[in-house]
C-alpha cells in the first residue's frame, strides 16, 4: 500500500488551512507524496501557510470551492489522484454560533458535492486504480457531544449528539460519507479527532489566540469558569495518523484520534503564560497570567471531550509522539519565531472578528 502513495498523487481539500497545510507539508516534503491542494482561500485559508511548498516538484495549488461541482470535476479529470483527503470546512465553533449559514453550505453541501464528483470519478476508474482509490473524510470529536467528568472517553461506537451548528454540520457530513460507502460501496474512511494545536493555526482558536494576545499585552479571554476540558493533540501527530489511516485503514471504517492529554482551559492558558514568561518575559516583570480575564461563557459550551484511541493504536500502530509539554513549547516558540505570519493574518477582517466576538463580553 505504501508504495502506491509514493507514486500517485493525493488531492487535499482545505490544504491552505491549519491542519491541511501541515498535512500537505508532511506528504510533499517528508514522504515524497505528490499533492494537489484545492482550497477556496476563505479568511482561514492562507497561501502563506504553504509558501515553502510553492516551488517544490509534486505540489500544485488550485483555488476552488468544493461546492463548485464542474471545477472539482475538471481537477479530478486533469490530475487523476489516487486518493482524496477532505479537510475543507468552516471550523470555528464561535463563528458557527454567530453565523451558521457558511457551515451548512461548506460542511454539508460542499461535502455532498465533493462526494458526488469523487464518486463519478471513481466510477470511471477501472482495475487497480479503482480498487486502490480512497476518500478520507477528516472530522471531529465534537460530533459525539459533551462528556460528564467521570464518563468514559468517546469511542467509535459512541452515539452522535452534536451540540453546536459547527458540530451538527460535521455530523451531517460524516453521515453523508457513511451513506456513500453503504449505498454505493464508495471507498471511504473517516477520522474523528480531538483539538489540534501547533504551527499555522489561525489566532481565533484558544491556543494561538492566547499566545498572540499574550505577546501584545492584551487580555486573555477565558470563557465561563475555565474548567471545560479538551484533549489536545499536536498537529503533526494528527497528520501522521491520517496518513496511517489512508494507507492501512479498513474501507468504510471510522477511526478516533486523540492526544491522551485532557486539560482544563485554565491549565492550558496557565501553561502558555509560564512558557511565555520564560521565553519572552514582560518588560515590567509581571507574569502573562495577570492578563487572564474571565468572560461570558460560549452558548451551549460543551464541558468535556476525551478520545478512546485503542482502535487506531491496536489496528494501525499509531499513537501520539508529542506530549502537551513538548508540543506547547514547540508551538509557542513557532509563534515567537513567526511574528510576520501572525501580523499578516491578523488583518482588518481579523480585528473586526475580535471586536464582534469579544467586545462587551
Ligand atoms: P481551518 O479553518 O484552519 O482551514 C479550513 C480550510 O478549508 C481553509 O484553508 C479554507 O480556505 C478551506 N475552505 C473552507 N471552505 C472551503 C470551500 N467551500 N471550498 C474549499 N476550501 C474551503 O481548519 P482546520 O482547523 O485546519 O480543520 C481542518 C479540518 O479538520 C476541518 O474539517 C475540521 O472540522 C477538522 N478538525 C479540526 C480540528 C482542530 O482542532 N482544528 C480537530 C478535529 C477535526
Ligand atoms: O474538538 C475538536 C474541535 O476543536 C475542532 O473540531 C474544531 O474545529 C476546533 O475549532 C476545536 O473546537 P473548540 O471549540 O474546542 O476549540 P476552541 O479553540 O475554539 O476552544 C477551545 C476551548 O477554549 C473551548 O472550551 C472554548 C475555550 N475558549 C476559546 C476561545 C477562542 C476560551 O475560553 N476563550 C476563547 O477566547
Image (tube, rainbow, N blue to C red):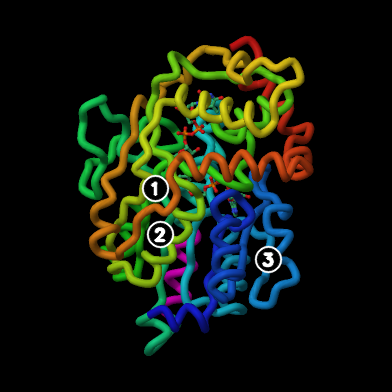
Front in this rendered view, residue 335 or 116: 335
Residue 192 picture location, percent across and down = 36, 49
Which quadrant: the C terminus? top right
- Cβ(mark 1) to ligand 1 < 8 Å? yes
Residue 210 picture location, percent across and down = 60, 28
Which residue, given by chain and number where applicable, does mark 1 sit on? 193
Quarter-of-image position of residue 288 = top right
Residue 61, numbered circle: 3
Residue 280 picture location, percent across and down = 70, 31
Residue 82 picture location, percent across and down = 48, 77
Front in this rendered view, residue 132 or 266: 266
Q: Residue at 58% of width from left, 32% of height from top? A: 275
Asked if disc 2 and disc 1 are in contact, CB closer than 8 Å, the reply is yes
Mark 3: which secondary structure?
Answer: strand
Front in this rendered view, residue 211 or 301: 211
Point out the frontmost of discs 3 and 2: 2
Mark 1: which secondary structure?
Answer: strand
Question: Compared to 330, does 281 lie above or below?
Answer: above
Mark 2: which secondary structure?
Answer: helix
Q: Main secondary structure of the magenta part?
A: helix
Asked if disc 1 and disc 3 are in contact, CB closer than 8 Å, the reply is no
Which stretch did the figure color magenta? 113-123
Disc 3 from disc 2: Cα separation: 23 Å
Q: Residue at 46% of width from left, 37% of height from top? A: 166
Which residue, given by chain and number where applicable, does mark 2 sit on? 241
Amino acid at each position: 500500500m505504501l508504495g502506491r502513495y509514493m507514486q500517485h498523487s493525493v488531492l487535499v481539500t482545505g490544504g491552505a488551512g491549519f491542519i491541511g497545510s501541515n498535512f500537505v507539508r508532511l506528504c510533499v516534503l517528508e514522504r515524497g507524496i505528490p499533492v494537489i491542494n484545492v482550497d477556496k482561500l476563505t479568511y482561514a485559508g492562507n497561501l502563506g501557510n504553504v509558501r515553502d511548498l510553492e516551488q517544490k516538484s509534486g505540489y500544485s495549488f488550485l483555488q476552488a470551492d468544493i461546492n463548485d461541482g464542474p471545477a472539482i470535476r475538471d481537477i479530478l479529470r486533469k490530475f487523476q489522484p489516487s486518493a482524496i483527503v477532505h479537510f475543507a470546512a468552516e471550523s470555528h465553533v464561535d463563528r458557527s454560533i454567530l453565523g451558521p449559514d457558511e457551515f451548512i453550505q461548506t460542511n454539508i453541501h460542499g461535502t455532498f458535492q465533493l462526494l458526488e464528483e469523487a464518486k463519478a470519478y471513481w466510477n470511471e476508474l477501472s482495475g487497480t486504480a479503482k480498487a486502490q482509490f480512497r476518500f478520507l473524510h477528516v472530522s471531529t470529536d465534537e460530533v459525539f457531544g459533551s462528556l460528564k467528568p467521570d464518563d468514559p472517553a468517546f469511542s467509535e461506537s459512541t452515539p452522535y449528539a452534536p451540540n453546536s451548528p459547527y458540530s451538527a454540520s460535521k455530523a451531517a457530513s460524516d453521515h453523508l460519507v457513511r451513506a456513500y460507502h453503504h449505498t454505493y460501496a464508495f471507498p471511504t474512511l473517516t477520522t474523528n479527532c480531538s483539538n489540534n494545536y501547533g504551527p499555522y493555526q489561525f489566532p481565533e482558536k484558544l491556543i494561538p489566540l492566547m499566545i498572540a494576545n499574550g505577546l501584545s499585552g492584551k487580555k486573555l479571554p477565558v470563557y465561563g469558569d475555565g474548567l471545560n476540558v479538551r484533549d489536545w493533540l499536536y498537529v503533526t501527530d494528527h497528520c501522521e495518523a491520517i496518513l496511517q489511516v489512508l494507507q492501512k485503514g479498513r474501507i468504510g471504517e471510522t477511526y478516533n484520534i486523540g492526544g491522551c492529554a485532557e486539560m482544563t482551559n485554565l491549565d492550558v492558558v496557565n501553561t502558555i503564560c509560564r512558557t511565555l514568561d520564560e521565553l519572552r518575559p514582560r518588560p515590567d516583570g509581571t507574569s502573562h497570567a495577570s492578563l487572564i480575564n474571565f468572560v461570558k461563557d460560549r452558548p451551549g459550551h460543551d464541558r468535556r471531550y476525551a478520545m478512546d484511541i485503542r482502535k487506531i493504536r491496536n489496528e494501525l500502530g499509531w499513537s501520539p509522539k508529542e506530549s502537551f509539554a513538548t508540543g506547547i513549547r514547540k508551538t509557542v516558540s513557532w509563534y515567537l519565531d513567526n511574528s510576520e505570519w501572525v501580523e499578516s493574518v491578523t488583518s482588518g477582517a481579523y480585528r473586526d472578528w475580535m471586536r464582534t466576538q469579544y467586545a462587551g463580553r
